[in-house]
Image (cartoon, rainbow, N blue to C red):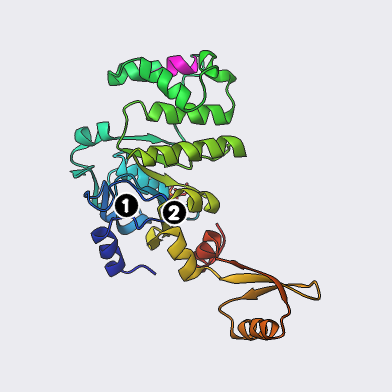
């Protein structure tokens, strides 16, 4: 379980240890955090939706919030984006307290949320142009973004003819019109086919590389593993772990190996298990091993270890 000290350490150390070592968040080590959460709480009557969480997110970091249904993910995002007032604690974006300085925070963020709608009877391009006009951004930004999300041709058609994936991509494009410093995505790939999901993940990675901080929730562990520099696990409104996927997998996941022996039998062994280690040593001593592949744990294992059941 994360302790108050862990949470304090997370705040003091928002440098987003580089998860995919090859893709560290830009400028993470030198700049102050983009998102800070201090003892954030939300109660709905007797329901403690978020029970005092603290962490910090670095500029350019892709930060994933994971947890079961009802764990408090959406409520956390709602408080971070000023859509819900916290019962206690603070959410800070780029140094501004979200609950106090909404006007300062608004231009710095944008979000893609489940309850958002598009104008179905307008084209994709018209949808974007309504928002470029609203933000006072040149209309050419709409075309730029249609290209970014691969909707140049479809952009001429009415949105009511779009597939779920196309609508989701258009919502992401709309959320990028004001070039947000922090983009909040609530389950961005839900309902998307594998190709659309992959395209959206690639876009998120590009945004992060360009310096945008991305804060997302997802139920897909592999997606979190691939995309996120760090992930936080919420359980019943509390933060139970926060680290890079690799560290979490090493700490909580089961390290295993698949061994093919000369008798053509395949064995799955646990590297942390003494008996399995002895078997491995004896096969090696007898030159019985044809192939040996080790596997690190998965984020799914981590989730089960932390929350007691799969997501
Ligand atoms: P999911 O994965 O299903 O979206 P979540 O992790 O986003 O779940 P939340 O939607 O934040 O969870 O809900 C956390 C808890 O707060 C749940 O018990 C939920 O029923 C409760 N809750 C959320 N919003 C309200 C509300 N407006 N009024 C009362 N209770 C609420």
Mark 1 burial class by Cα count in 10 Å: few <14, some 14-19, many 20+: many
Pick the front one: 49 or 299: 299
What kind of element bears circle 1? strand
* Residue 140 in the figure: left or right of residue 56: right
**Label 1 residue near ligand 1, CB within 8 Å:** yes
The quarter of the picture where residue 243 lies is bottom left
Q: Where is residue 134 in the image (x, y as percent from the top left)?
A: 31, 18
Residue for badge 1: 42
Q: Position of residue 100 (x, y in %)?
A: 18, 41
* Residue 114 in the figure: left or right of residue 48: right
Q: Which residue is drawn at 27% across and 60% down?
A: 13
Mark 2 burial class by Cα count in 10 Å: few <14, some 14-19, many 20+: some
Q: How far is disc 1 from disc 2 in space, using C-alphas?
A: 33 Å
* Residue 51 in the figure: left or right of residue 101: right
**Label 2 residue near ligand 1, CB within 8 Å:** no
Pick the front one: 60 or 175: 60
Q: Quadrant of the N terminus?
A: bottom left
Q: Is residue 125 magenta?
A: yes
Residue for badge 2: 20
Magenta-drawn stretch, dominant element (helix, strand or loop): helix
Q: Is residue 209 magenta?
A: no
Pick the front one: 123 or 74: 123
Magenta-drawn segment:
123-128
């Amino acid at each position: 379980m994360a302790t108050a000290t862990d949470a304090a350490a997370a705040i003091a150390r928002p440098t987003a240890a580089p998860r995919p070592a090859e893709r560290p968040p830009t400028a993470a080590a030198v700049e102050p955090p983009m998102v800070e959460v201090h003892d954030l709480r939300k109660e709905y009557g007797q329901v403690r939706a978020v029970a005092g969480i603290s962490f910090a997110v670095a500029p350019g970091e892709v930060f994933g919030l994971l947890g079961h249904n009802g764990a408090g993910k959406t409520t956390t995002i709602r408080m971070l984006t000023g859509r819900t007032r916290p019962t206690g604690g603070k959410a800070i974006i780029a140094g501004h307290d979200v609950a106090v300085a909404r006007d300062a925070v608004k231009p710095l963020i944008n979000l893609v949320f489940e309850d958002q709608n598009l104008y179905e009877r307008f084209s994709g391009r018209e949808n974007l142009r309504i928002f470029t006009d609203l933000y006072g951004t040149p209309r050419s930004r709409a075309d730029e973004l249609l290209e970014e999300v691969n909707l140049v041709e479809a952009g001429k058609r009415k949105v009511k003819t779009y597939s779920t994936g196309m609508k989701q991509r258009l919502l992401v494009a709309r959320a990028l019109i004001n070039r947000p410093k922090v983009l909040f995505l609530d389950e961005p790939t839900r309902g998307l086919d594998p190709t659309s999901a992959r395209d959206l993940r690639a876009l998120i990675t590009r945004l992060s590389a360009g310096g945008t901080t991305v804060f997302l929730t997802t139920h897909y562990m592999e997606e979190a593993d691939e995309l996120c520099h760090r992930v936080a696990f919420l359980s019943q409104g509390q933060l139970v772990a926060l680290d890079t996927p690799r560290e979490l997998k090493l700490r909580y996941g089961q390290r295993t190996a698949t061994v093919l022996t000369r008798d053509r039998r395949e064995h799955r062994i646990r590297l942390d298990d003494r008996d399995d280690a002895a078997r491995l040593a004896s096969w090696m001593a007898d030159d019985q091993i044809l192939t040996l592949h080790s596997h690190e744990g998965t984020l799914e294992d981590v989730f089960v270890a932390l929350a007691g059941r799969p997501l």
